[in-house]
Amino acid sequence: MQKTVVNSWNEWDPLKHVIVGRADNCHIPPEEPALDAKVPEDSDMRGQWGRRPQETIDRANELLDNFASMLEGRGIRVDRPTPIDHSLPATTPDFHTDSQFGCMPPRDVLLTVGSEMLEATMSYRCRWFEYLNYRPLMQQYFNEDPNFRHESAPKPRLTDADYHPDYLSEKIGVEKRLKWTAEKFFVTTEEEPLFDAADVLRFGRDLVVQHGFTTNLKGIEWLRRHFPDHRVHAVNFPGDPYPIHIDATFTPLRPGLILNNPQRRLPEDQREMFSANDWEIVDAAQPAHNAPPPLCYSSTWLSMNVLVLDPKTVCVEASEVYQMEQMDKLGMEVVPVELRDAYAFGGGLHCCTADVYREGGCEDYFP
Ligand code: NVA
């Protein structure tokens, strides 16, 4: 039977179909320029690589499976990727990496805009082949939905010319990093278009894209040309010394309301489209934890990496008591979901999912 399978224009309309990642065979990849720049100098990730310990993989899968079952219990269709062998090295004519990453988190790779799912270029060498984990699902959607547009952004070459060597020194220090990010001097150069899907937030006709380590200005320009019916806005958050992926920094909850990380506030001159249309940008609550879990790339701000199920309902990680309390005060029904032991695999509740279908169409929220 042929029907519409893929449709999602924003981050909050009622969710009906979603992809949830898997932790199978996930690897900590070896050193490479863009990835090293993201790992804090005092992180336990420095100098480590190889297959993640089996007990952590099993625990993460248990949590991801529970999350998927909970969503299914609420009537949401859940699909899962088919893991490729992430232990395999990847070699192209331009680079070599000794292992890959995993099929977590799908949000980094897949950008759904209306009836289209777009595979991002990615900017880490170890993630160059990650789209293959999702190809069986893309083929299925292609067969089921006559209007589904499966797109893939041009694969980047990821030679050394894509990375600023200044970022490769062992000890840069947070102060210098903050100066550089304020100057919009990031690890990636403007050699060729680069973007990760998790740097993009969808607001109907408007796409808000973080310029940082994983998305460069050429990547944003590529998105602008690729989506000619959209307005594409570049944003950046100078308070973030490791700016990758927008979804622990800026979190829309419903039309008119966005949570912003108080350490990474959107600069005044980039707020105009929101204030002119009466959107409120409120500081997110503090995370409940002082440090990320072991072997985790992300910051404690995964507290605000929430999955909105509809404009009144939101999934929040179960240990994030302050974030849950704030959601409650903002009038949202909170669904607590245990996921912290899966954070190390690439992120929280928003990261570990990718939209396939949300009700509703393409609205103009910023006329
Ligand atoms: N920039 C992020 C990535 C989270 C998805 C962080 O806070 O670590």
Image (cartoon, rainbow, N blue to C red):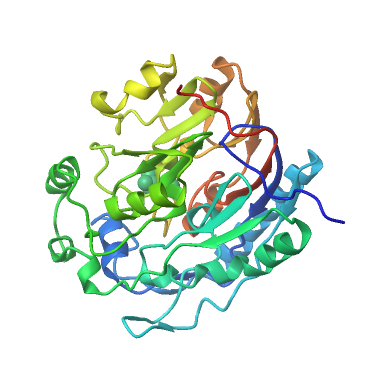
Judged left or right of residue 60, residue 121 is left
Q: Nearer the viewer, residue 264 or 44?
A: 264
Q: Nearer the viewer, residue 231 or 132?
A: 231
Judged left or right of residue 144, residue 26 is left
**Rendered residue at 46%/25% (across/down):** 258
Residue located farthest toward the right when viewing the structure as drawn: 1
- Rendered location of residue 48, percent (x, y): 35, 71
- Using the rendered image of the protein, determine whether residue 344 is visible from the camera's viewpoint: yes
- Rendered location of residue 201, percent (x, y): 47, 40
Q: Is residue 363 above or below residue 34?
A: above
**Rendered residue at 42%/63% (across/down):** 121
Q: Is residue 276 above or below residue 351?
A: above
Judged left or right of residue 74, residue 45 is left
**Rendered residue at 41%/20% (across/down):** 282
Q: Number of marks in the image?
A: 0
Q: Is residue 88 above or below residue 169?
A: below
**Quadrant location of the N terminus?**
bottom right
**Rendered residue at 38%/83% (across/down):** 92
- Rendered location of residue 191, percent (x, y): 23, 64
Judged left or right of residue 125, residue 201 is right
Specify the quadrant of the image occupied by residue 13.
top right
- Using the rendered image of the protein, determine whether residue 301 is visible from the camera's viewpoint: no
- Rendered location of residue 256, percent (x, y): 50, 19
